[in-house]
Image (cartoon, rainbow, N blue to C red):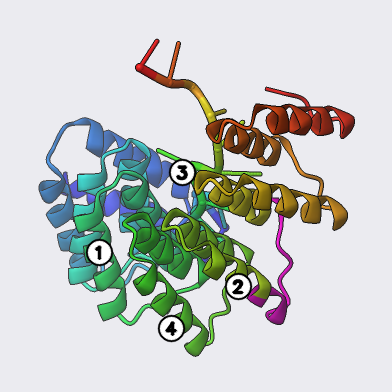
Amino acid sequence: LNSFSILALVLINSNLFSLANGLLSRMMETRIPVSTILSSLLESCKECDRLKSRSVVFELLIDAYRKRGMLNEAFSVFMGAKDGNFLPNLLCCNSLLKDLLRGNRMELFWMVFEGMAESKLDLDVYSYTTVINAYCKVGNVQEAKRILGEMEYKGCNPNLVTYNVVIKGLCRSGDLDEALRVKKSMAENGLIPDQYTYSTLIDGFCKQKRSREANMILEEMDKLGLNPDQTAYTALIDGFMREGKIEDAFKVKEAMAAHGVKLN
RNA sequence: GGAUUAUGAAUUGU
């Protein structure tokens, strides 16, 4: 195992990443527990202190575990690497956060996030957006908005996706008016709402049984030349049907056809 | 640069 570890480090040092990757895959497939692989790698890093880019070995291993859905193992490697002062780079951390959030592994998610913060890693718009999304998903829009403020304060500008995530969170929590205010505020930051923004709002209004207003949002979208797509129309049809407004639903279906958007 | 990461955008009933 130690020979493999050292070889992996040497390969990375020589920019032979895919070979290193193959080696790590073989190590994983032996079913040796992560903790053993991890300590072997950390030990080898200490021995081979003249090799460069040693933290890459942990990034490769995290990615390998992540992509196999082995999130506990990916997490362990992150923690071990961080504690050994081989903090994975931002892209790797962000990717791990994304998978932990999607996998609903929130305990691990927050531990990784804390680890990034305590290592003084500068978060980027991806990191912040993911964290905002995490808060939104548990209905904590307050905290989501706090992070939004924090990122701006730290000089990291929220982008279109960030705003869409916040708007979605507000819609889910039923705060439609605030969602509209946030949409308006995008212009101040030079951002133009896109089809995601509009579809999110349309769906939000529909889910609160405010389909008529949703219809107006769709019309606004159309006016602006942002072609409402299948998602926007489907959300609106669904909204009208939920309210029992069958005729309105059919009108939307006709408008949809007139705009050349197909029913799915 | 080895990895190229953030919106699981809508619908799919009982």
Badge 4: residue crowd in 10 Å (few <14, some 14–19, many ≥20): few
Report, in whole angstroms, how far the alpha carbon at label 3 lies from the one at label 1.
31 Å
- Name the side, left or right, on which A253 lies relative to A34: right
Name the N-terminal-most of marks 2 and 4.
4
Q: Which residue is mark 4?
A: A150
Q: Secondary structure at mark 3?
A: helix
**Residue drawn at x 51%, y 60% as measured from the top left:** A165
Report, in whole angstroms, how far the alpha carbon at label 2 lies from the one at label 3.
48 Å
> As shown in the figure, which amino acid type bears the numbered disc 2?
Arg
**Position of residue A51 measured from the top left corner of the image (x, y, whole percent):** 34, 67
Image height of A89 relative to B3, above or below: below
**A187 falls in the magenta region:** yes
Q: Which residue is mark 3?
A: A18
Q: Which residue is mark 1?
A: A110
Report, in whole angstroms, how far the alpha carbon at label 4 lies from the one at label 1.
17 Å
Q: Which residue is mark 2?
A: A181
Q: Which residues are magenta?
A: A185-195
Name the N-terminal-most of marks 2 and 3.
3
> As shown in the figure, which amino acid type bears the numbered disc 1?
Trp
